[in-house]
Image (cartoon, coloured by chain):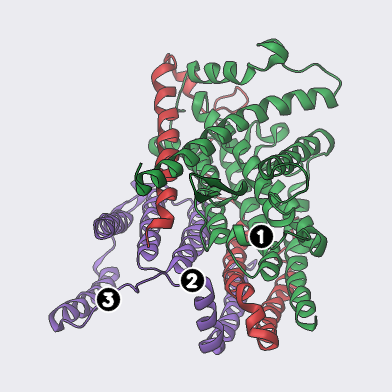
Chain colours: A purple, B green, C red
Amino acid sequence: MESALFYILSAVTVTGTAFAITEKHAVHAIVYLVTSFFALAVIFFLLGAPVVAIFEVIIYAGAIMVLFLFVIMMLDLGHPERARLPGIREWWPALALGTVTLASALALVVSRAPAISAPGKAIGVKEFALALFGKYGVAVEVISMQLLFALVGALYLARKR
Amino acid sequence: MSPIALDIAIHLAKIALIFFVVLTLAAYLVFAERRILAWIQDRKGPNRVGPFGLLQPLADLIKLLTKEDFRPAGADKWLFYLAPAMAAIPAILTFAVIPFGAPLQLFGREVPLQVADLNVGLLFFLALSSIAVYGVALGGWASNSKYALLGSIRGLAQLISYELSMGLSLVPTVMLAGSLRLSDIVGAQEGIWFIVYQPLAFAIFLISIAAECKRIPFDIPEAEGELVAGFHTEYSGMRFGLFFVGEYINIIVLGGLATTFFLGGWHGPWLPPFAWFSVKTLAFAFFFIWMRGTLPRLRYDQLMHLGWKVLTPLALVNILVTGWILMLR
Amino acid sequence: MLGAYLPILVLVAIAVIFGLCSLVFSSLIGQKKPSVVKLAPYECGCEPVGSARERFSVKFYIIAMLFILFDIEAVFLYPWSVLFKRLGMFGVMEMGVFIVILFVGYIYVWKKGALEWE
């Protein structure tokens, strides 16, 4: 039951992302991407990480994609007929990154490294919080600094010229 | 019956019960709103269909179903079709985590009156409310109408701004209860309700949910004086109906959540637990209707100021102060 | 692991069926007599002028950006609030520093006038 669900969800995730990349209409691409985030969140649930699953929805589907939607509406990008295929110059970084990712995935498969299996039971909020604020306490503070820099950067980009 | 079959039967019964009760309640809330507004404004309100107009929701349903269902020229076909469902479905789903009564003893087992008692129940609600914005945003954008687009942009900015203060105002209740599970939060209020410890958080939450429901004084996304009907200007028939019903389901659900977080959930003397929960939730619904009959609409800059300059910093300060006091105690 | 979530999946299915059914029934039952004028987007009864998908103020972009940042902060607050009794004073200080750093950013945003709507 769970593995069947997993395969269905991963199929949704992969096709959703593929459509998000190939879709020419920017708003439709967002809808596809949100769908794939949802499927991904349910996969996290299945892996026994309900907290991460919910954060995936709150932050990625609920906040970052909303920003994308605003930007697409703001820049008036909803005109697929004006879109053009990117030139070679824009393709090669994507190709290089894609090759690296594929190669490392292949290396993983070939080396038969033990995959991380789902824990027997779901990780609760308490265990999650204990690890986050105990073991990774410094990282949390660093993240707050990072958010501060992002804030300043966002204001700089949106300043009146 | 085998235990597993019994389990499944109980679950399905609860889901069906919740689904139909919530939908019926939403339909009657529309009717109640019209009657109460009429009463506030010294008119009669709908009183022709059935005794006291009680069959009015049914007449409305038939009317909505038989209306012409058209799509304006230049609209985005699929998004225009699906947006109303995107608005209504998250509201229904949120009800899954609300405990609406004390656990019952049925067939020799304890049955919690709640569809699913998630250990991340509060986050589940926040996640659903964070994706509920897509119905408004995409519906208005897909309509290819200027009023609809303006309404959806305003709505999007308003919903995300108040989502923030709504989420932050709940942190102190979690600190008091020590759990994100809604049944634990209710359980922690057996003696004293959290509204006593956290009146400020309650006020912030109440204002924020009024904004999340897009109710007067926060109904700027659909301000009929300036934007015709805002993001659902171009909608007709049952698609409009879904937007409408979603909004009223949202009122009931958010009222239920305010009850759960601050008013002790189903706790209360004399009356049975389920009755207490219903009374408190409907009191919130009545409060929203009353507000609509009393208050004027805010201006957009006032709305943003209230959200970003008053509620959000207050909620953050409230969290720190609560933490400090709980540590010193 | 799936047990607790199965009822929610059922409710999701029912809600989706309800949503789609009302959409389908509405388009099946309702009459259909479209005409060019009827299908024109509403614009006070006049002919629509220009495109409905206009550019709009950069203000909204700032609001969305601020929302992401503070939402991430809030997301850190929930696990902390569950555990904060066990983390004790150390936890309060930890979160205090976290919130104060972001508050500095918040004051900067305020002083820069990004929260003003004129």
Q: CA distance from mark 1 to mark 2?
A: 19 Å
**Label 2: how many residues lie within 10 Å, few (<14), some (14-19) or many (20+)?**
some
Question: How far across and how far down the image is residue B326, in percent?
Answer: 76, 77
In percent of the image, x 43 and y 57: which residue is there? C4
**Relative to B15, is B172 on the left or the right?**
right
Question: How far across and how far down the image is residue B273, in percent?
Answer: 68, 45
**Along the line of sight, which residue is nearer the eye, B177 or B156?**
B177
Residue C113 lies, with reference to residue B130, above or below; the image says below
**Relative to C83, is B220 on the left or the right?**
right
| Residue at image mark 1 | B187
* Residue B245: image tag: none
Q: CA distance from mark 3 to mark 2?
A: 35 Å
Labels 3 and 1 in the same subunit? no
Badge 1 amino acid: Gly
**Label 1: how many residues lie within 10 Å, few (<14), some (14-19) or many (20+)?**
some
Residue C26 visible in the picture:
yes
